Each structure stands twice: as structure tokens, then as C-alpha cells.
Image: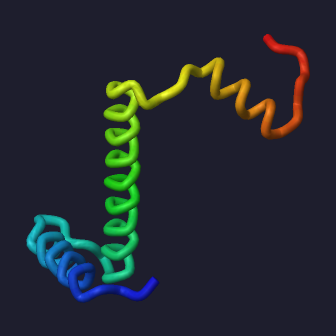
Amino acid sequence: MPVTPHELELFQDYVRARLGQPQPPESLQECLNQWRRDQQEAKVVDDLQHAIMEIDAGAGITLDDAVLQLRTSLHWYGQRS
């Protein structure tokens, strides 16, 4: 996926902030790696918060129903624990 101008601006802001810290990054690559990790972590947190809101709104299913759906889709009817 191509980089958008907005993403580039966000990364530039991130680098500037990191360079202003008492212990700036050793390299631009280190800064890029940390920025990617931070972005991935933020995405996971957003996804989890969204899932919790769906469950709270009654949109989720029980674990037993999820297991049943998985077993059915995989055609696996082994012994239930």
C-alpha cells in the first residue's frame, strides 16, 4: 500500500518528537521500526476496544457457540472437553 502524505507527516512529527528526547534514536531505521511497532500496537488496541463495544451491545456470541461454528466449518466433530 502506498504511503500517503498524511502518513508521512505523522512519521515526520514522530521523528521530530523522538529527536527532542534526552536519548534520541541511534538511527532513522530504529525510529522507523519503533514507529511501526507503535502503529501496530495502536491498531490492536483499537480492534480490541471495538470488539468489546460490540460484545457490550449484544453483537457477540458465546464461546460455546464460537467453538460449535468452528467445529462445523472445519467438519471436525471430535470429543468435546
Which residue is drawn at the image coordinates 12% and 66% (left, top)?
21
Colour approach in the figure: rainbow
Q: Position of residue 46 (x, y in %)?
A: 32, 48
Where on the picture, by quarter, is residue 81? top right
Along the line of sight, which residue is nearer the eye, 63 or 57? 57
> How many numbered marks does the figure carry?
0
Residue lying farthest top? Answer: 81
Answer left or right for 78 relative to 20. Answer: right
Which residue is drawn at the image coordinates 21% and 82% (left, top)?
6
Q: Position of residue 63 (x, y in %)?
A: 60, 21
Where on the picture, by quarter, is residue 68? top right
Q: Position of residue 43 (x, y in %)?
A: 36, 55
Which residue is drawn at the image coordinates 37% and 34% (left, top)?
54
Along the line of sight, which residue is nearer the eye, 12 or 51? 51
Answer left or right for 46 relative to 59. Answer: left
Q: Position of residue 28 (x, y in %)?
A: 31, 82
Which residue is drawn at the image coordinates 41% and 88% (left, top)?
2
Q: Is residue 60 above or below residue 4?
A: above
Where on the picture, by quarter, is residue 55? top left
Along the line of sight, which residue is nearer the eye, 44 or 55? 55
